[in-house]
Image: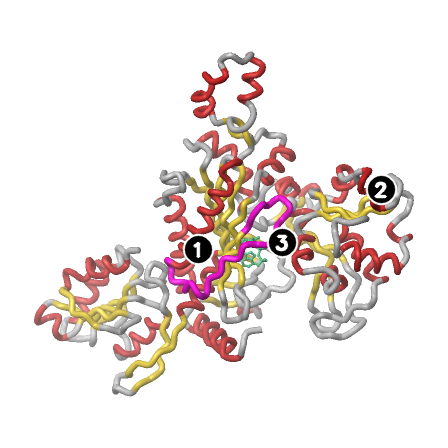
Amino acid sequence: MADEKQNERMEKLVSLCKRRGFIFPASEIYGGLNGFWDYGPMGAELKRNIKNAWWHDMVIDRPIGPDGQEVSIVGLDSAIIQNPRTWEASGHLAGFTDPMVDCKECKARFRADQVFVLGWISEPELRRFNEEVRVLFIPEGESLSQIDTEEVERLLKHEVRRAPKPYLKSVVASEAGEAERNCKLSSREAKHLGKTFPMKPYRLTDFVVTFANRLPPAPCPGCGKEGCLTSPRQFNMMFKTFVGASEDSASAAYLRPETAQGIFNNYLNVLNTSRVKVPFGIAQVGKAFRNEINPRNYTFRSREFEQMELEFFVPPDKGREWYEFWRSQRIEWYKKHGLRSDHLRPREQGKDELAHYSSACTDIEYLFPFSDEPQELEGVAHRGCYDLSRHQEFSGKDMSFFDDEAWLADQPKFADKSKEEQTKIKNAEPYRYIPHVIEPSAGVDRFTLAVLCEAYTEDQAPDEKGVMQTRVVMKIHPRLAPIKVAVFPLVRKDGMPEIATELYGRLKRRWVCDYDEKSAVGRRYRRHDEIGTPFCVTVDGQTKEDGTVTIRERDSMTQTRVKLEETEAWIAERLTV
Ligand code: ATP
C-alpha cells in the first residue's frame, strides 16, 4: 500500500485531471461505468502526442538496429473484431477464462482459484493458470466427483504446488478437449505415479470449480466475511458480442483483448505485399478490451484501453540479440520522455513466471504513487515461434519465411548434393523457418498516467503581489505537452490583442496553441502551468516600441525577450527532441 503522502498526491492529481480536462469518468452524467474513462480536451491531446511519438519513433524515424542498419518496421490498423478462430489460436478463448466467485456481502468478484488455492501455491504459478491449460490426471473410469475430500486437499496442497509431479502436467492446449486429445502421460510418468494406464486429463481450473464446495470454506478476501462467496462459475475476460442478426453461438465474436493478434493475422499479407524481409516489424496502435475483474488505480487497470504494440519477426538464432535490443530501446524511450530512471524498473521475469512458450520477458515497470511496488508499463517478450506456429496450425496457412537471398548465396556450397538433398537443405533453417517474435507491448493509458504522475509538481512562486504561493505545475515533456504555446496580450487594448492574434495565427499552423486575453496575466500563467504548456508568449507595451515579446518558460519561470519575428524559431529550437 502506498503511504498517506503518496495517496494525497494521487488525490491531487486526480482532481487536477478532472478540473483541467485531462480525464473524466466515462458517461459521468449517468453515474459513470466502472473501468471506463474518457479523455477531455487536454487528455485527448496528451494521448495523441504519446501515440504520435511512438508511431514516429517506430514507423517513421526508425532506430538503427544491432546490425548497424535502420530497422524495418511498417504500420497496420486491423479490425477490433477478428474471426473468433483467432482467439482459439492465440489461446485467449481458453486461457483468458477464469472461474470466478462473487461475494454476496461486498459484491466484489474474485478468481476462484485465488480464493481457494492462494496460500498453497505461489503467485507466479497462479499467473500461469491464465496462460496454460494445466491438466490433472486421474485414472480412467474414475470421475472427478469420486475423489474424496482428503484426496482433493492432498492434491491441491502437494501436487499443485510441486507441478509437474504426479497427477499434474502443464500442456499447451487452447481448450480442454484439445488437451484431452493431445495430452498423454508418458509411461515413465505413469510409473512414477504408481498408477496404471490410462489416465484421464482434466483442466486444473475445472478441478478447482468442481471441488470449491468441498474445500475448507474460504472467507471473502475483500470484506473478510465467511460463508458469503457464491459457487465458482466460468468467466472469460474477453467482451463477447454477436455478428449479424442472430445471437447464437455461431455468430459469437469478441472485442480484441490485445492488438497483437491482428498483426499475426496480417503477417502473410504484409510479407507478400510490402518490401520487407525478416527481420522486420509490424506496429499497431489501437483499442483493446478486457473485462477486468477488478478495475482499479484510476486508469491503470481499465476495461477499455489502448495499446502500442510491435511484433518484430526475427530469424530463430537472432532472437536473444533482438530481444536485448528492443528491451534497451524501450527503456531509453521512456527516459527520453521524462520518466525518471529511479522510478523506472526493468524487471526480467523469472523462469517460473514466464508463459510456457516464452523464453524471456522483461516488464518495464514504473513506480506510481498509488503503490509501493513498481507496476507494469510495458512488457518486452521473446515469444519464440509460438504465435505464428499456432496461427499456421489453426488457419492451415504456411507461415514460414524463406530467405531466398541467403539460399542463393549459399547454393553453390551444395552443388555436389543431389536435387532431393538440396531441396531438403533449402527447406530447413537457416533458409526456411517460422520467424521468432520479439514483442514490445505498451499501454497508452498506463504511459499517459505515468507522464501525469511524473509531471505533477508543487513549487513556490510569487503571485501578482509578490507573495510566495504554492504553484502547481505539470512538467510534461514538451513533445507530449497538450498545448505547446499560449499567446497573451498583456491587456485588451493599445493594439496588443491585434499583434497577439496575428502571432497566434502564425504559430497555430505549426503547433497546438492557445490564445487567452481574459483575466490577469498571472492567472493565465497558472492555468497553463497546470496543463503543462511549456511556453507562454506575452505581447506587452514594449512590443510596440521595440518589436519584442516576453517568452516565459514553464519550469524555470524565466522570462526572455525575443524579437516578434524570431518567436517561432526560438520555440521550434526548444521543442525538438
Ligand atoms: P497486467 O499484468 O498488469 O494485467 P498484462 O501482463 O496482462 O498486464 P499485457 O497483456 O502484456 O498486460 O498487455 C500489454 C500492455 O497493455 C501492458 O503492459 C499494459 O501497459 C497494457 N494493459 C494491459 N491490461 C491493461 C488494462 N486492464 N488497463 C490498461 N492497460 C492495460
CB contact under 8 Å: marks 1 and 2? no
Instruction: Using the image, tell me which numbered label, if any, was put on residue 15.
Output: none
Q: Which residue is mark 3?
A: 353
Q: Which callout, 3 or 1, points at the residue further toward the start of the chain?
A: 1
What is the x, y in percent for residue 322? 47, 43
Q: Would you say the magenta stretch is mainly helix, strand or loop?
A: loop
Q: Secondary structure at mark 1?
A: helix
- The C terminus: image quadrant: bottom left
292 to the left or right of 208: left
Label 2 sits on residue: 191
Separation of marks 3 and 1 at Cα, in angstroms = 21 Å
Q: Are marks 3 and 2 in contact (CB under 8 Å)?
A: no
Out of 303 and 244, give the one closest to the viewer. 303
Where disc 2 sits, the SS reads: helix
Q: Amino acid at mark 1?
A: Ile
Q: Amino acid at mark 2?
A: Lys
Q: Earlier in the sequence, mark 1 or mark 2?
A: 2
- The magenta segment: 336-361
Residue under label 1, please give it. 331
Residue 384 position by quadrant = top right
The N terminus - image quarter? bottom right
